[in-house]
Amino acid sequence: MAAKRLKALTKGQLKTFFESFDVVLSDCDGVLWRETKVIEGSPKAVSKLKEKGKRFFYVTNNNGKTRTDFVTKCNSLNYEATLDEVVCTSFLGAMYLKEKGFNKKVYIVGNTGMAKELDAVGIKHCGSGPDPLTGDALEVVTKFTPDPEVGAVLVGFDEYFSYSKLVQAATYLKNPDVQFLGMNPDILRPSVNENVFPGTGCFVLIVEAATGRKATMLGKPEAYMSDYLIKTFNLDPKRTLMIGDNCTTDILLGKRCGLQTLLVLSGVTNQEKLNEIFLPDAEKKGLIVPDYYTETLSDLYELLSE
């Protein structure tokens, strides 16, 4: 079934659409903002949805911040948000290990957001922050002594990724009892300009290649994220709308859970990628087709205001 453009719907169809959901799960990067810049009109759209009685949750694969950081960011960009309305993958990593009764140490290929969320649940960790190559590669390999307390490797977005970190992560993961967790599979982040902005999935793939192991992914579109959302927010999938800019994460999560899905074109999905979705055999080719699409979230404000 082809995706429907919201602005092409009749008034009756729009009314049916807006009355068909009570809860909105929204991606953040590429939908609400691009890095530090708000996407024009999106705050008004979120406010309008809440005014219409919709429960609204911020669901992001971003792992560079804590939930508290995201609340601060939302509020600074004119989005009203509370801690209970935010789910980010740095938080999910800590929740996953806590639920498993994990009592060892985590080696982090990642950032301070991931480290702080582990701190919040009392899980020991090492590895976050700069670890530059000193000497040559052979020296790194020969001098590294693994910490016997490490029982998991957690891979997220790492601005300080280095050969030293790759050696350590891969060495720990030689042990099949050491858990291998990836924050999300996103290869790209929505860029603020024409340059490519590689994402967390790139770091996960490198570690997978070095170890011959596949990471257990925690973020969209994987089961841990969807199970957490449905259980924590007591969602009725048939009355829930997933909004995102990425078909392979946001929209696929919605499809897997039986949610309605809305794709916006303000992030990683451009017109060229959208055109592929409209090919007659798109779904047969394995492409993820949303139920609806629109250019930007601000369109919802305009349509709800008519």
Image (cartoon, rainbow, N blue to C red):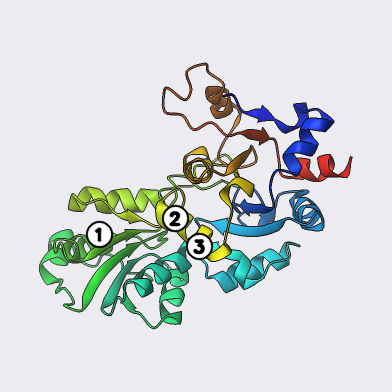
Residue 43 position in % (x across, y down): 76, 55
Check disc 3 and report its element: helix, strand or loop.
helix
Position of 292 relative to 224 (above/below): above
Residue that label 1 marks: 166
Give the amino acid type for the residue marked by disc 3 in the picture. Answer: Lys
Per the model, the C-alpha gap separating discs 3 and 2 is: 15 Å
Residue that label 2 marks: 219
Check disc 2 and report its element: helix, strand or loop.
loop
Residue 35 position in % (x across, y down): 60, 55
Residue that label 3 marks: 231
Q: Are marks 3 and 2 in contact (CB under 8 Å)?
A: no
Q: Residue sitting at 46 percent across and 81 percent down?
A: 120
1 or 2: mark nearer the eye:
2
Q: Callout 1: few (<14), some (14-19), or many (20+) C-alpha neighbours within 10 Å?
A: some
Along the line of sight, the residue nearer the viewer: 140 or 18: 18
Question: Can you name the residue that lies furthest to the top here?
Answer: 280
